[in-house]
Amino acid sequence: MSAPASDIILERMMALHPKIIDLTLDRMWRLLHALGNPQDALPPVIHIAGTNGKGSTQAMLRAGLEAAGRSVHAYTSPHLARFHERIRLAGTLIAEDALTVALDECYAANNGDTITYFEITTCAALLAMSRTHADYTLLEVGLGGRLDATNVIPAPALTIITPVSMDHEQFLGDTIAKIAGEKAGIVKRGVPCIVGPQHDDAAEVIESVAASLGAPLLAYGQQWHVGEERGRLIYQDESGLLDLPLPNLPGAHQIENAGAAVAALRHLGLGEAAFDGAVTNAYWPARMQRLATGPLVEAAPKAELWLDGGHNAAAGTALGAHMATLPARPTHLICGMLNTKDIAGFLTPLAAQAASLTAVSIPGEANTLPANVTAAAARAVGLPASEAPDVGTALAQITAQDPQARVLICGSLYLAGHILRENG
């Protein structure tokens, strides 16, 4: 079977810059100008940055808007199985023909100039979104914020900053404050900003940036509060109290993400249908996703299989906390990570919850951490560890010893994407 036309164009786009990441907005402005500035023709934009939770928050926000009858564009990254996942036009994943047209136009307009893959594909997303009617546009930052390719909207309707933690230090800085400064780069003059729970150093930076721009802040713990009481999500702000179901996305951390989504929906003037939809209708794959079908499930029918793409210390903490709430069952990790990540920071919170770790290298990924390095890091934090050539073999080794094991495949969105493609 021949490759889709979009895959061929995307492969060409990979060769337009020697680096995967090169943070600047100059190339974006050049290409957007050549395309007629599609970013200026988008429906009202909600721009979302943060280290953890921005994808889940976007998914809840989209679910809430759609439950209220609004049509929504959404842009997110990276994709898991297919590039098309990155772009939703009025609620529907972009069709192959529409994607091919947008990519072709961007490639031609770029005229062979240097531009990163993320930049030119972001231009294609903005172009496609500008040509389809919708009520709102949700843009998720790819990396950082200030110099991210999505930061080309001069006057969004709203910005959101989810929790900031250590990640991508080589690009964003080696302290929480420096990283928060990059994330706060999406704050715009006079535009309200919803702020999720933050470390004190991050909060101070975000507040300073917002004050300098006259951007009103709606911050967790100040203008809005959220928590769990008796199996319900309780949200409160100056407009009153909301008693909602717990989020359908698993994990205690999703309560805070839901709070940010509800704060945004309430600021936009939406009502009960939107709030309920945000917490009950959201879908976000590879975030504590239970695998129910596919070859892996068939190979281990008595096991309980989970998939998560979290890859930094904050994600490890959230995963560990969620695993502690699950019914008692021996839990085994299958883990593959990139060599740019803080593996000890990710694994340390999981060590108390897992019986073992089987390390794998991420298939087809040049920057994978070798399985033996992952295994050594696991042992260093107190996790019994072994290696396997692939996830299928790792699962077979685990279930040969314990057919009813709980198995969590984790460590990278790239590994999660491979699993979703292979498992069907």
Image: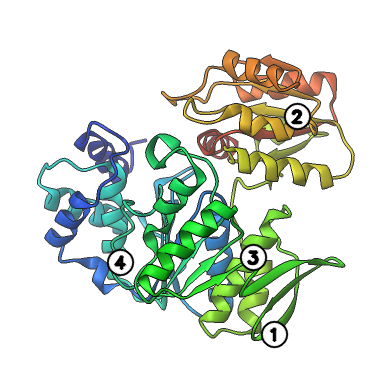
**Vertical relation: 118 (above or below) 137:** above
- Mark before the other along the chain sequence, 4 or 2: 4
- Mark before the other along the chain sequence, 3 or 4: 4
Pick the front one: 345 or 73: 345
Q: On the image, numbered disc 4 is attached to which residue?
A: 153
Mark 3: amino acid: Ala
Mark 1: amino acid: Gly
Q: Quadrant of the N terminus?
A: top left
Pick the front one: 416 or 240: 240
- Mark before the other along the chain sequence, 3 or 2: 3
Q: Are marks 1 and 2 in contact (CB under 8 Å)?
A: no
Residue 255 placement: quadrant = bottom right
Q: CA distance from mark 4 to mark 1?
A: 32 Å
Q: For numbered disc 2, what is the local secondary structure?
A: helix
Q: On the image, numbered disc 1 is attached to which residue?
A: 240
Disc 1 crowd, CA 10 A, few/some/many (<14, 14-19, 20+): few
Q: CA distance from mark 3 to mark 4?
A: 25 Å
- The disc placed on residue 351 is 2
Q: CA distance from mark 3 to mark 1?
A: 16 Å
Q: On the image, numbered disc 3 is attached to which residue?
A: 258
- Mark before the other along the chain sequence, 1 or 2: 1
Q: Is residue 68 visible?
A: no
Residue 402 placement: quadrant = top right
Mark 2: amino acid: Ala
Q: CA distance from mark 1 to mark 2?
A: 41 Å
- Mark before the other along the chain sequence, 3 or 1: 1
